[in-house]
Amino acid sequence: MKKVLMTIVTTVLTIGGSNLALAVPMTFFGVDTNPGGVVPAGGNAITARNDFLGNLTSVGNEDFEGIALGTNPPINLSFPGSTGNLTAVLASGPTVEVTNLNPVGQFSTSGSQHLDAGFGQTLDITFGTAISAFGFYGTDISDSGGDMVVDLIDTSNNVTVFNVIQNDLSVNNGNVLF
């Protein structure tokens, strides 16, 4: 089975008070097919990322550069937020690791390291406090017919499901999405 790579760039912002329930969800999505192992300047993925970040302040990214190669989840993560430091734990299935290898179609989106998730793996990121924004890059997703579904679970256990890619072979080898 071909491996599916997910490089996560997590961006978070906390919102205090009861205004969180009044927030209108916004989704930013862009995909570039066969970009040659880079996030193309001016491409759909970087445009979606820039639009996403343009709506936020006091955010942080995880590019896995500070995590030892070969590390498997659980991985403790930390991000600056608008109200202070935010923590999260990344958990997963058995074939997920931090790597700097770029097999066919896979590549890092910043630096030289990324999180490599084997085909059919589930990634679970649990934040220590409520967040109001989450974004990530993914590369080489679905060229083997895999799905990518993001479930967001709020503090009341309400689930919002985003079907990012469902068995879509048209999002072919070496793609990058945000």
Image: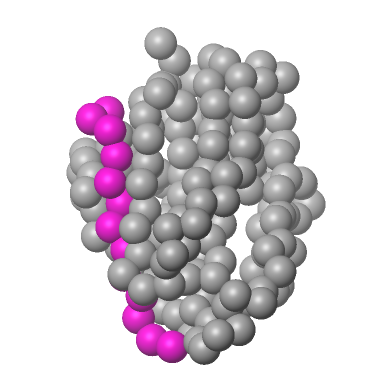
Q: Position of residue 97 (x, y in %)?
A: 28, 37
Instruction: Name the residue: 31% across, 69% down.
Output: 128
Q: Position of residue 145 (x, y in %)?
A: 57, 16
Q: Please say whether residue 123 is one of the residues in the magenta stretch.
A: no
Residue 74 visible here = yes
Instruction: Name the residue: 53% across, 61% down.
Output: 134
Nearer the observer, 101 or 129: 129
Q: How many marks?
A: 0
- Is 168 placed above or below 43 here? above
- Is 127 placed above or below 172 here? below
Nearer the observer, 20 or 55: 20
Q: Position of residue 69 (x, y in %)?
A: 24, 43
Q: Position of residue 48 (x, y in %)?
A: 72, 55
In the image: residue 14, left or right of residue 163: left
Instruction: Name the residue: 49% across, 57% down.
Output: 158
* Prevalent SS, magenta region: strand
State the scheme by which the image is colored: one colour
Span colored in magenta: 83-95
Q: Quadrant of the N terminus?
A: top left
The answer to which image quadrant residue 38 occupies is top right
In the image: residue 122, left or right of residue 50: left
Q: Please say whether residue 94 is one of the residues in the magenta stretch.
A: yes
- Is 94 placed above or below 26 here? above
- Is 49 placed above or below 128 here? above
In the image: residue 78, left or right of residue 159: left
Which residue is situated farthest in the top direction here? 1
